[in-house]
Image: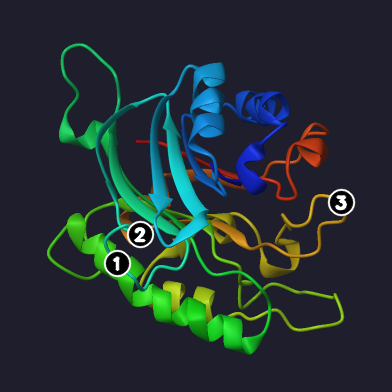
Amino acid sequence: MTYNILEGGIGRIDPLAEVIRLSGADVVVVQEAWEDAAFHKLADRLGMDRFWAGNPRNQHGAVGLLSRWEIREAVNHAALDQRLTRGAFHAVVRRRSQPPPSQKEELGVIGVHLHAKKTMADEQVRLSELPAVFEIAREFAGGGVGVSHVLAGDFNASHPGQRVNIGWELPREVVRKVLERGYVDAHALHHAEEAFDVSFPTSKPVVRVDYVFVTPELAPRVKGCEVFKPEMGRFASDHFPVVAELEL
């Protein structure tokens, strides 16, 4: 799952926890985890392992990872790379089992939140962040998209094939570049472009800016990917989460 919890989720931990519970998600990439105490409270509510990644240059840029699987390793890249205006991390999660799981029972995860707002100047900022995001993938292999992993988050950009009728054109180049890099939009695997769902805002959803991308070899293992819209979701955040089901 990728989930923008809106302004740290402060005052909304219970409905956020309920949305995540209802989804059945095992691994959750969280954006706008502004306050570490609230993020840890959410993790405790869910009984999940957690990794919080703040941005020392932007107090509103924190992202995080919640996981029912063990978080074997995690690195906060926003603290290391000034090109990242908000947040980005990579992690490896591992299924909890006895005997110890094989490498096939591990999953690489890159979580991101790119620069916000809708102008083409803002899109240029997001485009300047992408090289830093793509370099994170090299943590999983020696270049390119590399070893199987998920790239998930709030990209603040629309899919090139998404039909948007909101009176202005939402930038699309960032998502186009991600697709050209070789990533696969999990939602597009099971939905024609005319049936793409929308995730933002929850008051009246008109666009999808939240994505779960997978590397090509994981694409056949994606059994579904939906914008998750329980009634509780309208009160929990201004984004509905996107949930992908992978068979590993």
125 and 200: which is toward the camera: 125
Q: Calculate the distance from the C-alpha at mark 2 to the C-alpha at mark 3.
A: 31 Å
Disc 2 to disc 1: CB gap under 8 Å: yes
| Relative vertical location of residue 20 with respect to residue 78 in this rendering, above or below | above
Residue 236 drawn above or below residue 113: above
Q: Nearer the viewer, mark 2 or mark 3?
A: 2
Q: What kind of residue is marked 1?
A: Asp
Identify residue for label 2.
Answer: 78
Residue behind mark 1: 81
Read off the residue under disc 3. 203
Q: What percent of the width, then of the height, locates residue 31?
A: 54, 49
Judge by depth and name the residue closer to the eye, 43 or 187: 43
Q: Nearer the viewer, residue 47 or 34?
A: 34
Residue name at image x 73 percent, y 57 percent: 197
Q: Is residue 239 visible?
A: yes
User: Which residue does the image show at 47% across and 29% down from the upper left?
Assistant: 26
- In percent of width and height, residue 227 lies at 68, 47
Name the residue rendered at 41%, 74% in the picture. Answer: 129
Element under label 1?
A: loop
Residue 217 in percent (x, y) is at 31, 55
Looking at the image, tell me whether mark 3 or mark 1 is earlier in sequence order.
1
Which quadrant of the figure has residue 112?
A: bottom left
Q: Nearer the viewer, mark 3 or mark 1?
A: 1
Question: Of label 2 and label 3, which has the lower sequence position?
Answer: 2
Q: CA distance from mark 3 to mark 1?
A: 35 Å
Q: Residues within 10 Å of mark 1 (few under 14, many from 20)?
A: some
**The image quarter in which residue 68 lies:** top left
Q: Distance from label 2 to label 1 (Cα)?
A: 5 Å
